[in-house]
Amino acid sequence: MNRFAVRRAPRRSLTGLVLKIGAGLAVLVGAGLGIWWLLTSSTFAVARVESGSYRFTSRVELETALADFLGRNIWTLSTDEITDRLADLPWVRDLRVRRSLPNTIEVDFREWRPLWQVSEIRGGAAGNLRPLVLVEDGRILEFPGHVVMAGLPVLVGVPAVREGDRGVLRVDSNHMNQIMELISAMEDAGLESVSPVDFIVTRDEGYAIVLQDKRGILMVGREDFTDRLNRYMTARDHLEFGLEIDLRFKDRLVVKKLDD
């Protein structure tokens, strides 16, 4: 017996090898045809773009922005492309886009909230036909013509600049931070539930809140808005109408009679 005999490997069947190669090619061809069908079939051509409820964005603006996407293949249409297009609409925020097979794009977004109407802007001539309003990111926008404006307080004399190719008006960040703090303080104190506000006037010494019905003017400066307004709310029932009430001094009110 030969101790050094080596066992030979079995011969591979040429037919089996050919079959395996053929099966692999068939899978590749099938996958390629499937991808080609997904990318070219009219089944996946976008037929509808659905959106949730919205108020300040006009239907015409939205349909115009989305019109180019109809008929596009749902797989090759980038959601980023839709997001970028809708982000150009002034009232759109917090945008989400998703595909709903076979042929629908779903768009969901929130809109910016108008805070105050704006008048007598410093540093940037307005020249707008419709009323202007301040929104939460500091931009000053034309209020849409298809919506009835609620009775918003009017911010007077706020400094703003025009920026970008479109010349959008924007309040600088320092003033905008103060405005948001003032709005929060007014809401926390419940000021407008008892003394509705006509104007918020921007002065060199800070903000002055002009109350409706000649109730008075509240000088709140540029800081500590919550403490100052709470001090007014505590004392308001003991104050006569027609006073300018300076709340900038800690633990006291300074009042003077307004000229008629």
Image (cartoon, rainbow, N blue to C red):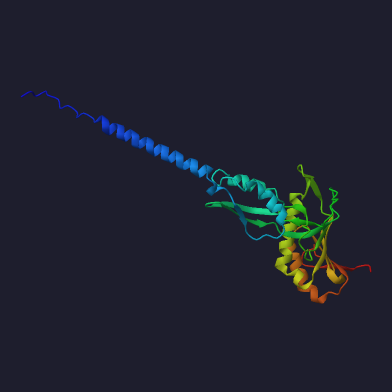
Between 51 and 93, which is closer to the camera in this rendering?
Answer: 51
Residue 134 x %, y % = 76, 56
Judged from this view, the residue extending furthest toward the right is 260
Report the side of 255 relative to 115 (left or right): right
In the rendered view, does 202 fall on the left or right side of 28?
Answer: right
Tell which of 220 and 85 is nearer to you.
85
Query: Which residue is rendered at x = 67% and y = 59% of the image?
Result: 54
- Tell me the residue at 29%/32% (across/down): 17
**Residue found 82% across the figure and 51% down from its top:** 159
Snapshot quadrant of residue 149: bottom right
Task: From the viewer's side, name the closer residue of 207 and 125.
Answer: 125
Q: Is residue 226 visible?
A: no
Total labels drawn:
0
Q: Position of residue 236 (x, y in %)?
A: 80, 73
Is 16 situated above or below 185?
A: above
Residue 141 shown left or right of residue 46 in the figure = right
Rendered-image quadrant of the N terminus: top left
Q: Quadrant of the C terminus?
A: bottom right
What residue do we see at 70% from left, 67% from top?
Answer: 188
Furthest toward the left, the residue is 1
Quadrant housing residue 204: bottom right
Furthest residue toward bottom: 237
Instruction: Tell me if I can see residue 161 in this picture.
Output: yes
Rendered position, 191 above or below 131: below
Percent x, y for residue 174?
75, 51
Image spot of residue 24 (x, y percent): 36, 36
